[in-house]
Image: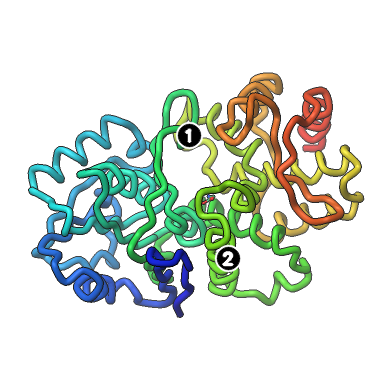
Amino acid sequence: MNVQIALKDRSYDVVLGQGVRHGVLEFIRRARPRTKTVVVVTSTSLRRQAWFDFVDDGLSVLEVPEGEAAKNFSALEALCENLADLRLSRDDVILSVGGGAITDMAGFGAAVYLRGIDVVHVATSLVGQVDAAIGGKTAINLAAGKNLVGAFHQPLGVFCDFETLESLPERERLSGMGEIAKCWLLEQRDVSDLDTTSLFELIEMSVRLKAAIVASDELENGRRALLNYGHTLAHAIEALALQRDTDELRHGEAVGIGLAYAARLAYALGRVDADAIVAHDTVLDQLGLHRSVPDDLDTMDIVRAMGHDKKAHHDLTFVLAGQGGFEVVPGVDPETVVRVLESFRGEA
Ligand code: GLY
C-alpha cells in the first residue's frame, strides 16, 4: 500500500507492507536513472539482521553509531568524510536503513553533503515508520537539547517494511506505541476501537495523519506543530534522562508520559473535562505505555527544560486539547505547569 506525501514537485510515496524493502533498489533505479552509486547508511547491529538481505553485496555500506549516539557532529563529520571518499556525486543516492536516529542523521547528512543529495529511507523501527522517516525533518542533537541542529530535506521515498518489526526489541516497539497513541488521540478515535485495530492498521492510520498534516504545512508554520502533542514534557524528560543514561527513556515512552500530562494540563486550564484524562489514560494503558516521570528528575529542572524546547518562544508552550480541537497554546502560566506536574507525579 502506498500513501502519498503530496508536496507538488517533491511529492513522494510512503510504501507500506510485508517485504516492501525488496523493491527499494529497483525504485531508486527507476526514480534516478543517472545514479551510479547508492550508499547504504546503517548500524552494525542492523546490518546483522536477517532482513538486511535486500542490500546487494556490491553496495557500499557505511556504519554509524547505534541509536542516539549517531546524532552528533562527530558521527556526521565521519559520515560526510566517508561519502567524499566514495566520491558520491549529486546524482547519487543515500539509502538510510534504520530507526529514527539513523534516518534523522543520514537525512541530515544528505541535506548538507554537496548542499543536498537524494535520500531514500527504509524505516526499520516503529517510531521510524509512523513518524521520524516521514516528512523531511532531519537533525542531530546538541548538549542543550535534542534535534537542535537540522534541516528540512524531503526524501525521494520511504519504505516501511512490516517484516523488520518482527525482530524489534520490546522497548523499541513500545517507543513506537507512544507516537501511535499521539496519533490516535489527535484523530480523536474511540478507545473502544483500539482492541480490534491491528498493528498494521495503527501504522497506516499514523502515516495517513502525518501525510495529511505535512502536505498542508511542510515547514511547520502552523498545523504541523500539532504533531508535537505530548512532546513538550517528553523532550524535557528525555533530554534530562539522556544527560545521564542514553537508554533510560526512549522517545516514545517519554511521549506517552507527555500525553498523559498534557491531558491533565488541559483539564487544569478548563479546556477539557475529566473524561479526557480517562480517555488518554485508557489509550496509553491499552498500548502498554506507562505514565511515570522518572522519580529522581527534579520538577523545576523539568520545567526549565520545557522552557528550552525549540518549539517554545522563551515561554512554556504546549499542544493542548480544547473545545475546538487541538491547538498550540503559548505562554502557559508556569505556576499551573508546576502544580499540575507535581500532582501528576504524585499519582504514581
Ligand atoms: N515528528 C514531528 C514532525 O515530523 O513534525
Q: Quadrant of residue 270?
A: top right
Q: Nearer the viewer, residue 132 or 137?
A: 137
Label located before the other in sequence (2 or 1): 1
- Residue bearing mark 1: 146
| Residue furthest front as drawn | 9
The disc at residue 347 is none
Question: Identity of the amino acid at label 1?
Answer: Lys
The disc at residue 212 is 2
Q: Is residue 18 visible?
A: yes
Name the spot of residue 188 as percent of width and height, x first. 75, 63
Q: Is residue 296 visible?
A: no
Question: Identity of the amino acid at label 2?
Answer: Ala
Name the spot of residue 124 as percent of width and height, x first. 38, 60
Q: Secondary structure at mark 1?
A: strand
Q: Nearer the viewer, residue 206 or 54?
A: 206
Above or below — where is 237 with respect to 53?
Answer: above
Query: Residue at image x 67%, y 45%?
Result: 230
